[in-house]
Image (cartoon, coloured by chain):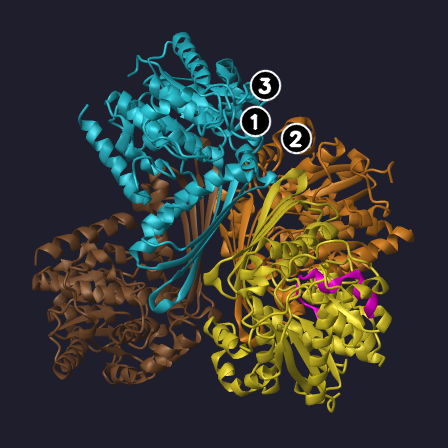
Chain colours: A orange, B yellow, C brown, D cyan
Amino acid sequence: MADKKLGIWLVGACGNVATTATLGLFALQKGMTTNAGLVTELPPFAKLGLASWQSMVVGGHDIRSPCMTATAERLAAEGVVPRDLLDACREDLAEVESRIQPGIAYRCGKTIRALADMPLAPDDVSPRTFLSQIQSDLQAFRDREGVDQVVVVYLASTEPLTGGELPTTWTELEPLLEETGETSLRASSLYAITALERGLPFVNFTPSAGASLPAIDDLARRRGVCHAGQDGKTGETLLKTVLAPMFAHRNLEVMSWVGHNIFGNLDGSVLNDPENRAAKIQTKDKVLGGTLGYDPQTLVSIEYIKSLGDWKTAWDHVHFRGFLGTPMTLQCTWQGSDSALAAPLVLDLVRLLERSSRAGESGPLAHLASFFKSPLGSDEHDFAEQYRRLLEWAERHSAAD
Amino acid sequence: MADKKLGIWLVGACGNVATTATLGLFALQKGMTTNAGLVTELPPFAKLGLASWQSMVVGGHDIRSPCMTATAERLAAEGVVPRDLLDACREDLAEVESRIQPGIAYRCGKTIRALADMPLAPDDVSPRTFLSQIQSDLQAFRDREGVDQVVVVYLASTEPLTGGELPTTWTELEPLLEETGETSLRASSLYAITALERGLPFVNFTPSAGASLPAIDDLARRRGVCHAGQDGKTGETLLKTVLAPMFAHRNLEVMSWVGHNIFGNLDGSVLNDPENRAAKIQTKDKVLGGTLGYDPQTLVSIEYIKSLGDWKTAWDHVHFRGFLGTPMTLQCTWQGSDSALAAPLVLDLVRLLERSSRAGESGPLAHLASFFKSPLGSDEHDFAEQYRRLLEWAERHSAAD
Amino acid sequence: MADKKLGIWLVGACGNVATTATLGLFALQKGMTTNAGLVTELPPFAKLGLASWQSMVVGGHDIRSPCMTATAERLAAEGVVPRDLLDACREDLAEVESRIQPGIAYRCGKTIRALADMPLAPDDVSPRTFLSQIQSDLQAFRDREGVDQVVVVYLASTEPLTGGELPTTWTELEPLLEETGETSLRASSLYAITALERGLPFVNFTPSAGASLPAIDDLARRRGVCHAGQDGKTGETLLKTVLAPMFAHRNLEVMSWVGHNIFGNLDGSVLNDPENRAAKIQTKDKVLGGTLGYDPQTLVSIEYIKSLGDWKTAWDHVHFRGFLGTPMTLQCTWQGSDSALAAPLVLDLVRLLERSSRAGESGPLAHLASFFKSPLGSDEHDFAEQYRRLLEWAERHSAAD
Amino acid sequence: MADKKLGIWLVGACGNVATTATLGLFALQKGMTTNAGLVTELPPFAKLGLASWQSMVVGGHDIRSPCMTATAERLAAEGVVPRDLLDACREDLAEVESRIQPGIAYRCGKTIRALADMPLAPDDVSPRTFLSQIQSDLQAFRDREGVDQVVVVYLASTEPLTGGELPTTWTELEPLLEETGETSLRASSLYAITALERGLPFVNFTPSAGASLPAIDDLARRRGVCHAGQDGKTGETLLKTVLAPMFAHRNLEVMSWVGHNIFGNLDGSVLNDPENRAAKIQTKDKVLGGTLGYDPQTLVSIEYIKSLGDWKTAWDHVHFRGFLGTPMTLQCTWQGSDSALAAPLVLDLVRLLERSSRAGESGPLAHLASFFKSPLGSDEHDFAEQYRRLLEWAERHSAAD
């Protein structure tokens, strides 16, 4: 692997997660950090022949003028990334910024469009027009950087839910790309389609459902490309999928599960729009039923509290019933940096999709379920079980290829 | 199974856990409760042919005059057991009380001896004398109740740690039973030895190490009897063995893990004696290292707060480090009734040991690791993995026997 | 005082608070409880010559058929009131039930109307019609029970905010009482007006703004009657008005204050209707600005979680900034029975209004600010300062009258 | 005031609190911070004519070689002080370091002595020898810096409790200063005595009881000097003295109050020695009884958890009983930087003692009770009441002098 270059294409490149992932990659390349937070650095993944950090190069799209350095400054001020790391990487960040291209916001709603500091094409342009633009940006990146493979990671702000009915096969969906009228597609759909059409592995790390449509999955299978998603499982939901099995395996009846999330980064500000929030809450709220076998009353809120910045705080209150009906309570408070939790998973997923791609795997990668709130290709929400399947996959590929 | 009677012999019969288990058994026999809290009532255990609740009959030892009804009154006042259940079971409780025999407190220390309201034999009697007494009580119970099999469950207050060096084989240990001088054996050792010598399955649900000596395990293997222990995993430690793997599998470095436990039942009052507490903290504190692969700073306290009664409240504070060294925090507060959490596990274990016994299994039952803080015969502390092994065992025995 | 009878007229008599207050009064009369939770039983109030518990007799209105006993059963099952108290008071409860008259729900919205199990007069009847009915019920109570004085306490479910502009003087408001068309008055307005017109002290213990209109206050002053309100300060808001001064007096800058409240009683179910909730959140949310001198970002949610019943759980997250801008956090979790917190304050207020009435005080009783989230006649929200003013009043009246 | 220079002499000058106070003073002098955290910057103190920040100059003692800059680096890395402030103040810190003299550790126990990186005089030297040394250091500071007044603030690590009986008058105590054998005096006693003998106001910001002996108070009164202490009230105890009155004024019965404190700074490491901890827990634990009027069961622990550094986390669990005996719970988690909370109070106290000194006040300054866990000269623990008395003092002196 050492001789080949691997491209990472981040959609939403100037956001917190993309910036932290990029800075983290530099830290790994410069030996300035430990491997904390990186799943693929655990012993069971040592013999997979994963791409080295040294081989990776980053580019991306954003609807804001390149501002990764400004984002990094903010994150350093908030204590999310170390200041000395930022100081050591200013030139590297500038280089990445020079590779960031103007992004698209096709039918993403007014809250997302308001983030842009550049003219955005109107929504009545045909999707195909956008596809061509994205594709040509990707091709230019490959040519200029001499990369063999690119993994595209969708990290842009959460879009509103896709509205109407959409066809479930690629054959039926493809003609819609020529439409200039209203469609139920979203920017995320167009990024996914471009990547998969070109044979590039695609990760949807966000709750945006537009990138995870059945017809897009159909496209991936037809082209023999792999993809993964949806919505990185980083904090409160991770905890839920770890705790819910405990209740299930002890036959403790969960009567209600309340989760309140507060945070103040850009993601939070976008989620303050009820349209955009709907998508997020949907992926956070459906993990319990499957694991428990019944649906307790649940409540999930996500609220924007400016002073918290990137530090997401979640309070979970679980009310459950034990032997003889005795009511009991478990409360958890999770205080974590959203970006420091998400960024290493982005790097892990790049490595794992590149590896699956090399192994010829296509369609949704169900063995990556542990990384997502709404895993594509899998109904399993129990984190321990999800992780066991990842280990099995790793063992299989450590020996085989 | 339906026609055979199964005896449950509870050591510490008038304590909270034994009383709740007994009341719970009546509730199950009378159809007055759901199966909440009972692991063996989950679907994977349906085809094991486990003993029915109807077949079970309870007796036991205690160093207090039979006072199960008084204990039940207190638990009802604290909201641990429903008052209408208690009202429906007064006669049944009185019947069990009539089967409770005076217990022993061999070398259990002054705090435990102070609980007795009856004359206790001094510590300089030979262990063998006690063994004979216990054995004759057990035999009388079998004869009078016509039970085929008895499972002995040790639920008495936590003893001080066994002091000195003890031989690790039964051949070497057996002669000590004739000693009238000081030995490192404890009451729990004598109950375990009696049960296993007589071929009766034995469960050590407490932290008392005296019942889980290597030489006693050797005895179990030689006699072909099964046993299980040590220290039921009911609340805070259960949570730890569920959460620690999450940190490990996400490569999040746990820097410190603090757990403060407060409660006010008799168990708590005994644990207020530092001698007795030492045993408890030892079993609570060693679950992390194995799972994480390193030893973070840990702190475990157990304190007696009278007003809480049976309601154990535990505050856990986990300080961990993610990507780029970013420090984060998880806090949990667990508020549960100690007895309502433990009692169903006692009933589960009775069923599971009886089943293993019928299947001819002997020695420590490693597949029961999920029930214990310091599982005999197993180094596995990850709850999900422990439970998976229990499921495997269940599957094997559902088909086979 | 001993020889005179004092009537307590509870509007919403079958609700949790009214039922707990009534049961508590019986407990006090029978000597079955301590004085815990009763402010007026503290030493500074000993010489005020307050009405004795023995002198009090309860009646009331409700839009549900008298069901105080059923409510009490539910509260006992939830652990809010002791079962043996309930058992001792069944006849007394039945007697109170016989004094409960059909209530009104004038312009209270569909959620409240849906609670009724009796035919309700439509909203296009003139307010005066309702006034006459209420007044005649009150008169019948006084006659039948031979009470000298009646304190009317409004405890019914939270109404939607009063809609449009309303006149601020009684002279202008009075003619509206003859209108059969839409008015901005609410049921609470009509209860308040009836009481005050008849010279009876009135307490608005709820967030319903309809009872606390300026024109109604004007009426109180004109008639020389005293009244108090609005919205009993029982749990999370009490805590806020205790904690906020700490931040202010230490010059710690509160950046954000988030409060999530979950509970499952009838009150919670009514507040699940956004129309009704608006009134509640308004009173909970405005206590900070006055105390701090600036407005931090705040968030207050109240959500209905059925399993919690009367046990309100509130999580508060305060993000503040200290010296050199260092951000810090205080989190509180309050787990209390809503009714057990509110009921003694209702009894306290009855005593205190009766006493003020005897002393000839009229208009809003500002010295009672410590009892309310939105105190009438006072801008003071600092609980310590509010309490100090109550003490001053008590001292003044202990000597004087 | 503007023309006069005010000296601040910090004992334990290289510790976290002293360093943060010094850095904070520079920030104020340079206009690099807001006044957050400073009580004396609140409006009620505006007309007192307090010393300006510009007028102040810092010196001190420490038993470690001057290392304020190293301490500041560590605090910046922990996020307690801003890095850009540190960068702007390196020269100023070096200047203060040049004024730090070798300290004493008279009878402070082995844990404190182990902190020294310089030879310490043995404990069998007479106290008078140490007094002379301290006095000459103070005199040199005054001469060199041309300061009119010096306030001495004791910030060194918590000493073991003073052992035996000590005389309560200065006349009886003074002769002990010549003893070379064992005395019950401690280093803190000697610093206090030197300051007060020389007429310099003295603040004991620590739990060390040695500086707050009755005989030392006697000295202060005789010399007409003012002093204040003991043990700065910064976090959990502040919260206790704010919350306890709430329970008292609502007649809610506190059944138990548990407080667990974890942190990892040097203070924490010293308190890990049970001898030193005893002093601390004593001052933290006695605030409840006075306010509540009875003594609930309490538990206070302070534990050293290295990873937390200066960030003290305290979990408080209050179990209380309301109306009809209903048990309820309040839990609080306080996460604050110990030094950022304490440092501004140090600066406030310097100003306030200098002001009292100018006003001719002597003996213990009871109006400063709100700053301390165990206020000298006052039995009042209710924070609101303590603050009210401070306001009264401020009002009196705003007009008068």
Q: Is residue A293 visible?
A: no
Q: Quadrant of the N terminus of chain B?
A: bottom right
Q: Which residues are magenta?
A: B203-220
Mark 3, other Cα within 10 Å: few <14 / some 14–19 / many ≥20? some
Placement of D41 over or under B214, stated as above or below: above
Residue D143, horizontal then vertical, whole percent: 39, 8
Placement of D307 over or under B339, stated as above or below: above
Kindly identify which numbered label has been placed on residue C100: none
Question: Residue at label 2?
Answer: A85
Instruction: Kindly give the residue lying farthest to the right in the view shown.
Output: A400
Whether tag 2 and tag 1 are in contact, CB under 8 A, the answer is: no
Question: Is residue C202 toward the left or the right of residue B222 in the image?
Answer: left
Instruction: Kindly give the residue lying farthest to the bottom in the view shown.
Output: B3
Question: Is residue B167 toward the left or the right of residue D253 in the image?
Answer: right
Q: Chain of mark 3?
A: D
In reply to whether residue B215 is colored magenta, the answer given is yes
Q: Secondary structure at mark 3?
A: loop
Q: Three-letter amino acid code at disc 2?
A: Leu
Kindly identify which numbered label has been placed on residue D113: 1
Q: Secondary structure at mark 2?
A: helix
Task: Give the Cα distance between marks 2 and 1.
Answer: 38 Å
Question: Residue at label 3?
Answer: D118
